[in-house]
Amino acid sequence: MNKLLKSIAVFTVICVLLSCTVSAFTDVGNDAWYAENVNSMTSSGLLNGYEDGSFRPESTITYAEFISVTARCVQGTIQPSGTHWASGYMKHAYENGWYDYDEIYEADFDKPITRQMAVKIVDMAFKIPENEHDNNVYYQYMQSIKDFDKIPGRYGYLVVRAYNNGILTGDENGNFNPFSSLTRAEACAIIMRAKGEGSVPAQTAPTVTAAPTQPAAISGGVSQNGKLSVSGTRLVNQNGEPIILRGMSSHGIQWYGNFTSYNAIKNTADRGANLFRVAMYTAENGYISGKETVKQQAYAAVDNAVANDMYVILDWHILSDGDPLQYLNEAVEFFAEASAKYANTPNVIFEICNEPNGNVTWSGNVKPYAEVVIPIIRQNSDAVVLVGSPTWSQDIDKAADDPLGFSNVMYTCHFYAGTHGSWLRDRIDYALSKGAPIFVSEWGTSAADGNGGVFADETSKWLDFLSSRGISWANWSLCDKNESSAALSPGTSPDAVWNDGDLSESGKIVFSRFD
Ligand code: IDC
């Protein structure tokens, strides 16, 4: 009997001792991986448990809940400014650029937040340091996150940044699951880690091959040819020898950013391309509305081309915004930063206005625009600059008649084989005869709307003509969209090695003409 009482007493003492360290919630075990994060979140009043003493760690968390907790961490309590209880927090988040207008609608406030949005919110709110632009880092995560190719382009680099800062790890299969929901326990952990206070589970380093620190030299690439310049009407390499660049343009990176990955670009290099063009739309949900996100995507794409030893065009893709002067200030800001960032990267070529169109003229709009933007670039870099012309970069004759006074400038001529024929080739000859260097920074095998065709015979006439004149080109576009100008069949994975079956009718023609 004595023995039994003794054991009970010992047992009670142990229980009391244990209860000091046990979680405040009935359903959060002390040894749960999230216990520490949940306890610190709840003890600082950032997130509450339920009246019944539970925390419900496995329940999903909504947009409103996740964003209000995050906002409370960085900003404190914010009163509602509308009918929804979290409207004040949501407004704060929106106004501070934590999400864009097309990412969360009011009707979604009480729906489970997706993992990709949670990553974006904490990234913006806690200003997570950038370090994914080290090619090696980006490449590693691209390889180790199994479903990386499912992550929409606008979130890819944010996810890399979150992993790289220990904010997140994948599921047991190595997937990120961009569209899945988040549990309350996971939310606590993510927010606490982003805040710099969370416990981080032990991670095993990803077992992947690192991106080559020295890019593999490709034929006709930067390691062979170095810095480019313009001599007469020709593009020349570091030794002054004529060089021709051929490759693919991306589609709009805000839509098909996944085809600007290291592997996607490598797939074109392996087929002989030495050029990649990064089409950064200004309008149409591009740079103007999504500045930071779209810019980082563009830089990541440039870096992936550089890691492949390619020359790369950074394209300010005006289209529905036909007058380049419309976003002159934004262009100045962008090119000032980009030219400084890539001042010592011989790969980079700047294209300052894709296709002026509408009620614009060379002398009244495009030339004055170029005369502001080019000197901004020249403060940092004497890289080759490509300049468009009115009528979707077909008025090269106007530019040739009234050229810009800067060196290392070329004029772009854009054609679509189903729409533009010999008259435009004649115009190229006219421009060349006047001493204007021409670069075909965008062309398609289709009609001008990106569809129709493929116009194989016209394409072949055009490409023979360009070769005979030594003119460089980039083809529209490297993506799997269901339109005839797209080089890949719908459903092609950006990162798998492409076989001929993955190439569309257009892609088969274009990929056979890189060299
Ligand atoms: C097209 C794309 C198409 C997209 C459209 C609008 O192929 O999927 O819906 O833009 O954004 C250009 C432009 C280029 C166009 C292309 C085909 O530079 O952005 O892409 N084109 O219409 N100039 C002439 C043709």
Image (cartoon, rainbow, N blue to C red):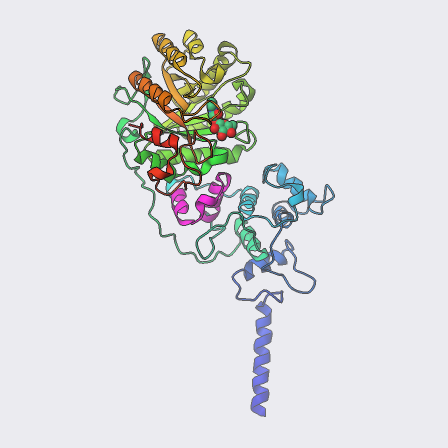
Asked if residue 444 lies left or right of residue 118, the reply is left
Front residue of this view, candidates 251 and 158 = 251
Image coordinates of residue 132 in percent, x first then y, are 43, 42
Asked if residue 351 lies left or right of residue 219, the reply is right
Quadrant where the C terminus lies?
A: top left
Image coordinates of residue 354 in percent, x first then y, are 46, 22
For the point 42% across and 39% down, the residue is 133
Asked if residue 160 lies left or right of residue 288, the reply is left
Q: Main secondary structure of the magenta part?
A: helix
The quadrant where residue 273 appears? top left
Q: Is residue 336 visible?
A: no
The magenta segment: 137-164
Q: Residue furthest bottom?
A: 1
Front residue of this view, candidates 84 and 22 = 84
Front residue of this view, candidates 365 and 492 = 492
The quadrant where residue 279 appears? top left
Question: In the image, is residue 280 above or below residue 195?
Answer: above
Q: Is residue 63 visible?
A: yes
Image coordinates of residue 417 in percent, x first then y, are 41, 21
Image coordinates of residue 380 in percent, x first then y, are 41, 24
Question: In the image, is residue 48 above or below residue 352?
Answer: below
Quadrant where the N terminus lies?
A: bottom right
For residue 143: magenta?
Answer: yes
* Total marks in image: 0
